[in-house]
Image: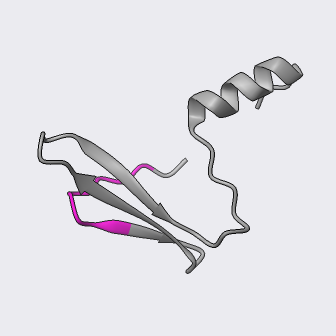
Amino acid sequence: MLVLRRKPGEFVLIDDNIMVQIIKTDEGHLRLAIEAPKHISIVRGELWEERNKALGTTK
């Protein structure tokens, strides 16, 4: 696992076609903005865990 420190407005590129940018809301919360090709599946962690628990698989 790679852990990076990023400030609002900064981003990382994954394989030259997935951009993950840090966004700061007016309330001061940080959010991730992910831009990726349509064929790339993006799933929130809690949904991924829930699905895998239901299927009886873990990683």
Q: Is residue 55 left or right of residue 25?
A: right
In this rendered view, identify the residue nearer to me: 7 or 48.
48
Residue 54 sits above or below residue 13 on the image: above
Q: Is residue 41 left or right of residue 45?
A: right
The percent position of residue 50, horizontal first and vertical second, equals 70, 23
The percent position of residue 1, horizontal first and vertical second, equals 55, 47
Quadrant assignment for the C terminus: top right
Residue ranking furthest to the bottom: 16
| Image quadrant assignment for residue 41 | bottom right
Residue 9 sits above or below residue 59 on the image: below
x 68%, y 33%: residue: 48
x 21%, y 40%: residue: 29
Give the extent of the magenta segment. Answer: 3-11
Say if the magenta span includes residue 45. no
Q: How is the image coloured?
A: one colour
The percent position of residue 7, horizontal first and vertical second, equals 21, 57
Q: Main secondary structure of the magenta part?
A: loop
x 27%, y 66%: residue: 10
Q: Is residue 59 left or right of residue 2?
A: right
The percent position of residue 12, horizontal first and vertical second, equals 41, 67
